[in-house]
Image (tube, helix red, strand yellow):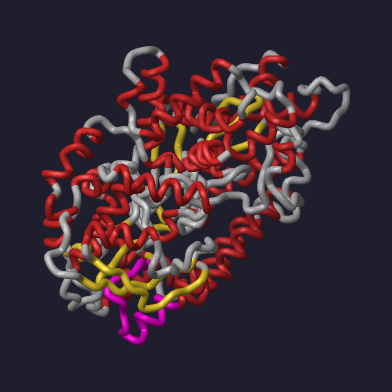
Amino acid sequence: MKAKLLLTAMAMSLVLSACGDNGGNSGNAGNGGNGSQASGNDGQAANAGNEATGDDLAYGKSAEPVTLSIGFKIPDDKLKNGDTNENNIVSRYFESLTNVKVVHAWEAKGDDAFKQKVNLAIASNDLPDAMVVDRNQLRKLIDNDMLEDLTDTYEKYGSQLVKDLYASTNGMALADATSDDKLYGLPNVAIEADAPSLLWVRQDWLDKLKLSPPKTMDDLEKIAKAFVEQDPDGNGKADTVGLEGDKSVVYGQKPNPNGFDAIFGAFHAFPKNWIKDASGNVVYGSIAPENKEALAKLADWYKNGLIDKQFALYKETQEPIVANKTGLFFGPWWMPYWPLADSVTNDTKAEWKAYAAPLDADGKFTTHMAPVTDRYVVVRKGYEHPEAAIKMLNVFTRYERRQDPNTEEAKKLDDYAAETGVHIRNFYPFDLLLDYSDAVVKRYNDVQKAVKGEVDPSTFDPDTKLVYDFTMAEKENPKKNMDAWKPAKAYEIGGAVLATQPMEKVYSVFYGMTRTMETKWATLEKLESETFLKIIVGDLPVSAFDDFVAQWKKLGGDQITKEVTDIVNDK
């Protein structure tokens, strides 16, 4: 039973980071491993083997005991055998490797409480030796000269593995934590694959109705109409709907099911992102005129019944997908994990496929991207051992990546996690996970090469090998083991689109919060979401978009745009 639980947990870990980094509260019950992070990039195995000699400073013990005080976010996990948040099997192991004793200056339960504690520490100028901060907190700390410059310390003590992970972002991650050529934080790294929103289609319905795969906006419209009118499920009832939606309309950075982000992207509209217009001016993407075209198209589809009339009323956005009432929705590459596994369980005839669609007027798939990082480990100015924080990042990242050479000790953590259900990663000193930016695409390519017999799967890192094993199991017994189906199809279908389809990738020029946003952004966001939804469902005319833009500017948008422009131009 323990082995089965561990296998299931390992399967689920392959998508955890893709579903959003929830502060590590839903980690792998096995190796603490965020499976979608271990990409198996060429040379990584070799790097792991060289770390014992090439990373002496990175992994070597401090000559004298060092104390590192931190702010700690309390997880839900219940520890056993008298262990505490500060003294447990995880902390003892990392201390044995580094000679760094981590103590908790304070603890907070939940994201909001942790953020408040950090804000209080900044306001009172009473920082622990190191802690995790968000983008806005990092800016305040830098502006008030409260942080240690980590440039030289990172270069000297950063492990090759950590440096490789940062390098996969083409310099963007470290640049995000740098000011005046000084590195003030060690950022997390998110996978690039999580940002695009793909079109997921019931391929068996498409085939039954003899429809071609979707490429253009017209193709999408034709398919939605057919799915509504031509009884694609063959039950003789008019109970299927067209394109599914979510009342949030767009997600803006990392999507979930049913957002319309890809529709807006096809019109070169990027709501909830800060972009530069044709003249080079910084503009809030939601007020750009291209949004009006996207809203007009969606309103027309809704009026003509091509979008599910009930989409804004569902308590859970996945309901019509799971019930197999729709065969058309947008979502990221990991949809087979959820909600498509439930769709297939409820109807084993369901065959889903993903497409990079609709294309724009030039025949290109245009998508917004997400920030490569949003959290940072920082060290208070004056702390005598800033390398202690970096050493801790080195050792838990190596363990997280399943490259820890201390196999016997690492196995003890694995066994502990499997036996107790405790998530190892929740007891790392910092809630900061690193990933290869191209993790999903690289793993897809590696697994496909192995399936074709071009490479030996025994050379893969453990997580890539696991995807390969699940892929082969799914090929041998389709839909018999949904724990195998989920990762197999997520990579085989979603990963394939990301790996093979060219995409025009648009990054926001600003992620964060300005002074005026702190007091007015919530009101502006509510105005935006309500206006967009009302236009789509017909409660407001499309012309109301112009009124929204004027009101947005008047209620603080113009001042916020000025502040964002100043920040962007100062970079």
Tell me the residue at 26%/48% (across/down): 166
Does 208 appear above or below 68?
Answer: above
* Position of residue 342 in the picture relative to residue 287 (left or right): right
Residue with the most extreme bottom position: 124
Relative depth, front residue between 522 and 84: 84
Res 266 visible: no
Tell me the residue at 72%/15% (across/down): 208
Relative depth, front residue between 539 and 36: 36
Tell me the residue at 34%/23% (across/down): 458
From the top left corner, tell me how far across and down residue 471 is, in percent.
49, 23
* Position of residue 3 in the picture relative to residue 400 (left or right): right
Q: How many marks?
A: 0
Res 409 visible: yes
Quadrant in the rendering for residue 35: top left
Residue with the most extreme front position: 81
Relative depth, front residue between 144 and 13: 13
Q: Quadrant of the C terminus?
A: bottom left
Q: Which residues are magenta?
A: 117-133
131 within the magenta span: yes
Q: Quadrant of the N terminus?
A: top right
From the top left corner, tell me how far across and down residue 570 is, in percent.
25, 65
